Image (spheres, rainbow, N blue to C red):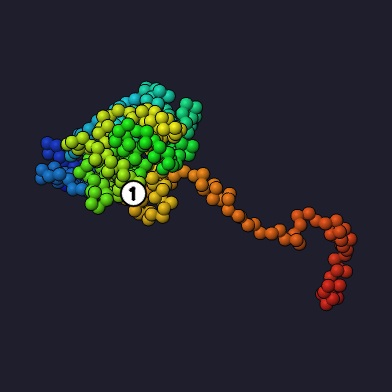
Amino acid sequence: MASLCGDPGKRGTSYRVICKALGNRRHTIRLGRVNKRIAETARLMIESLESAKAAGHSPDRETSEWVGRLGDEIHGRLVRAGLVEPREQATAKIVTLGQHLEQLFGSLGKQKPTTARNYTRARRLLEEFFGKDRTLDSITEGDADAYKRWLLARYAPASASVDLRRARQFLKAAVRRRLIAVNPFAEVPCGPQVNDDRIYYVPAEDIERVIAACSDGDWRLIFALPRYGGIRFPSEAEKLKWEDVDWENSRFTVHEKKVEHHPGRGRRVVPIFAALRPHLERAYRERDPGSVYVVPRARHGANLGTQAKRIIEKAGVKPWPKLFVNMRGSCSDDLERQGVAEKAINAWVGNTARMRQRHYHAVRAEDWAAVIGRSVRFPARSASFSGIQEPSTLHDAREKSLDVVKDAETQYPRQGSNL
């Protein structure tokens, strides 16, 4: 049984616990100057350790938690008494930006090619600005502000915002790993990730002219599927098979490669809209025998944007920014303006209304015309209203008497009589 002893002194009582553990010898665990209640608790815990050691069992949960909260000095005394095992030496912390990013990227696992490319770019920019050997705890909020200014001087605000958000994400991981106490990017405003100047509505008339200029069915569907079907190109077009097309029910199944890692996502069913059907039926009639995929050219992994711009120019149409994204956005915009239920658009396009409004929908020319051409009636100006005081009013104001007593007697005779 452990016993508690107190040694009175000028500066207070020092307590020690005497126990038997290692080799059945007496050991003294000095607690220092603490109050008696804490010393008694320590005695009970040491006694519990002594009993567990004698019985060959692990200590109970409460005792284990108490041992975990002990400082290294008293814990070392328990180790020397044979009551607990030595603590493992803490591994050296990763202190440089390069070391942290190397370990972070090694733990990310498999990523989509575009995500991996974007993460690599954000990492390269961070290491270029700060240097790989920069210690994490030396990066301050002011350095984060300087990094933002550096990005804005080199890239468009939307691109700089994306890289700044990734820098915040990378340093947040350092906080979660207890490498730094505060994320220096936490309070840095990142700004919008959308460039409204690059959102463009693609009229159906322009798409029809472009489709007419295409040389084969592949290219016709490369323009028709995102514009009239609202699918992502090329990630969703490359997996689209003819067996996914349900002609009888006028719908087709889209495999959502971009969001397949989210729970409940990975595929959606889209109607064969009236504008899309003739182009899809023509491609089906002209397909090669035994053809499996609807758009084989989308599976080659080549960048089709350059050739797409040549076809657009050949059709006499000026190429628009973000070729395929804006075609998909224009399809979403048309559905919303036609009064289709929001939930249906969400299901068919694969995006929420908030995301569509933010990234896809533009203010059209007809929106301006609808307001400017409409007769707007404003309330008539009141004849009695005047922003400037007339001279006669000013003159009357100057002529008013300042005799308060006389005015009170005139307006309030009874009150004036009491003055």
Q: Residue furthest bottom?
A: 414
Please name the residue shown 34% across and 49% down the image.
Answer: 274
Residue 216, visible in the rendered structure? yes
| Above or below for 140 versus 207 | above
Residue 93, visible in the rendered structure? no
Residue 83 percent location from the top left of the image:
18, 39
What residue did someone put label 1 on?
274
Of the pair 113 and 338, the residue shown nearer to us? 338
Q: Is residue 288 left or right of residue 399?
A: left
Please tell me in which quadrant of the rendered image residue 91 appears.
Answer: top left
Residue 119 percent location from the top left of the image:
34, 31
Residue 86 percent location from the top left of the image:
20, 34
Of the pair 265 and 222, the residue shown nearer to us? 222
Residue 376 percent location from the top left of the image:
61, 55
Tell me the amino acid under the disc marked 1: Ala
Please name the residue shown 18% across and 36% down the image.
Answer: 289
